[in-house]
Amino acid sequence: MAAEMRVSALVLAAESPYPLAGGGALRTASLLHYLALRYDVDLVVFRQPGAPDPGSQLPAGLVRPGVGGASCRCTTVAFAARALRNMVRVARRVPPLVDRFAGFGREIERALEGRQYDIGIVEHFWCAPYWEQVAKVCGRTVLDLHNIESVLDQRCAEVEGGARAWAHGVFSRAALKLERTWLPRFSEVLTASRSMRNARAPLRRGRA
């Protein structure tokens, strides 16, 4: 009976938290372990071409099999091509990581087809536009902000010089526009600190 009453959670992450490397991975892993105590958890992640199945790197029993093995591919590029791509992103006014993880809506819909969840959590602002796919199958939606991208880029612009500072300024304004669009759509927004919470408060009301 207890197993039948367990609620379910979906986590959509930009990258697998395992192997643990860096603060972002630690934050996502901590969230998964917390959820696993209370929910049956499905995980959908992006992976680089040729990378191992993300599900094979997770601790046994952390997520349910099936969706945990479904992943979307994002491309890798050499340094010169990456620089060129970022120049194009500046011209298009699209933050780099938002652009990098964009365009996989159909893959995510296929991974989630026929499933329903009590709660869906999207890791990183970069994946916030997938609220549209997550909201279709989840009773509540949560965005876990590791950073406020508009603030991060603005701070980078303040310490950089020349073209790099200008590009960060462009990305900061682009991120702010996207934050005003997507943050208000989520049922809840998690932040990593009180200062982040205060900074995102006006964004949830669609202004800043």
Image (cartoon, helix red, strand yellow):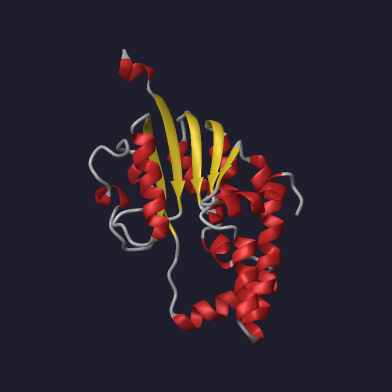
Which is nearer the eye, 191 or 100?
A: 191
| Horizontal arrangement in the rendering, residue 59 relative to residue 21 (left or right) | left
Residue 150's place in the image compared with 77, above or below, is above
**Percent of width and height locating residue 67:** 37, 40
Of residue 81 and residue 24, the one placed in the foreground of this image is: 24
- In what quadrant of the picture does the N terminus appear? top left
All told, the count of numbered labels is 0
Quadrant of the drawing holding the C terminus: bottom right
Residue 164 percent location from the top left of the image: 61, 81
Residue displayed at 57% across by 60% down: 98
Q: Is residue 23 left or right of residue 154?
A: left
Residue appearing at x 32%, y 38% in the figure: 63
Q: Position of residue 32 (x, y in %)?
A: 37, 42
190 lies above or below 150: above
- Let me know if residue 120 appears in the view: yes
User: Farthest residue toward the bottom?
Assistant: 162
Q: Given the current orientation, which residue lies at the most extreme left position? A: 60
